[in-house]
Amino acid sequence: MIDNFKLTQEDHDYLKETYNLVKDIPEDEWMKGDFSDGKGSCCIIGHDNRLRSDDPSNYDRNSLSDGRYRTSRLRKITNNICHHFFDTEASIASVNNYNQYKQPVNGFDNINTKQNVIAFLEESLEIPVE
């Protein structure tokens, strides 16, 4: 673990906002392996993109994707965290999908998708700020 790693205030605030946006979403509205089912469930990237959009009731998969290049801010911030603390190129998407495609991120391999994501966000918010 790299103990001198710090988040920027801006990244910390973004993670805190994400946490506040998603913490009360019921467990049955979380999914893995896709951004949205088009009906009411999303992965963490889908929820974050949806709730920050102009139309939070839109569950269209294409609207919630972070694109071919996986460029969402949440993914970038959490990729940096995973790289520094877990020596992996994973991101919060891997925490959400818990070993569906890759190895789980150490300590975040609970079968419950929401619990994994919330625990990861809570621990990430404990990282010191620059």
Image: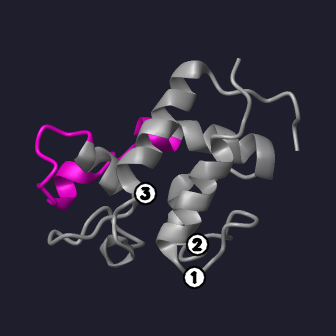
Q: Quadrant of residue 98?
A: bottom right
Magenta segment, prevailing SS (helix, strand or loop) = loop
Q: Is residue 128 above or below residue 95?
A: above
**Place of residue 10 in the rendered image (x, y in percent of width and height, measured from the top left):** 52, 21
Closer to the eye: label 3 or 1: 3
At horizontal 65% and vertical 44% (from top left) the residue drawn is 124
The answer to whether the residues at label 3 and label 2 have Cβ atoms under 8 Å apart is no
At horizontal 19% and vertical 70% (from top left) the residue drawn is 40
| Left or right: where 114 falls relative to 2 | left
Q: Quadrant of the N terminus?
A: top right
Residue at the spot of label 1: 111
Instruction: Count all numbered tags in the image, as a single digit.
Output: 3
Q: Work out how far the residue at label 3 is from the one at label 1, CA to CA, in angstroms.
A: 17 Å
At horizontal 36% and vertical 47% (from top left) the residue drawn is 21
**Place of residue 41 in the rendered image (x, y in percent of width and height, measured from the top left):** 26, 70
The answer to whether the residues at label 3 and label 1 have Cβ atoms under 8 Å apart is no
Closer to the eye: label 2 or 1: 1
Amino acid under label 2? Tyr
Magenta span: 52-75
SS at mark 1 in the image: loop
Residue 104 lies in magenta, yes or no? Answer: no
Residue at the spot of label 3: 23
Amino acid under label 3? Lys
Residue at the spot of label 2: 98
- Please tell me which of labels 2 and 1 falls first in the chain: 2
Q: Quadrant of residue 77?
A: top right
Q: Work out how far the residue at label 3 is from the one at label 2, CA to CA, in angstroms.
A: 18 Å
Q: Is residue 10 above or below residue 82?
A: above
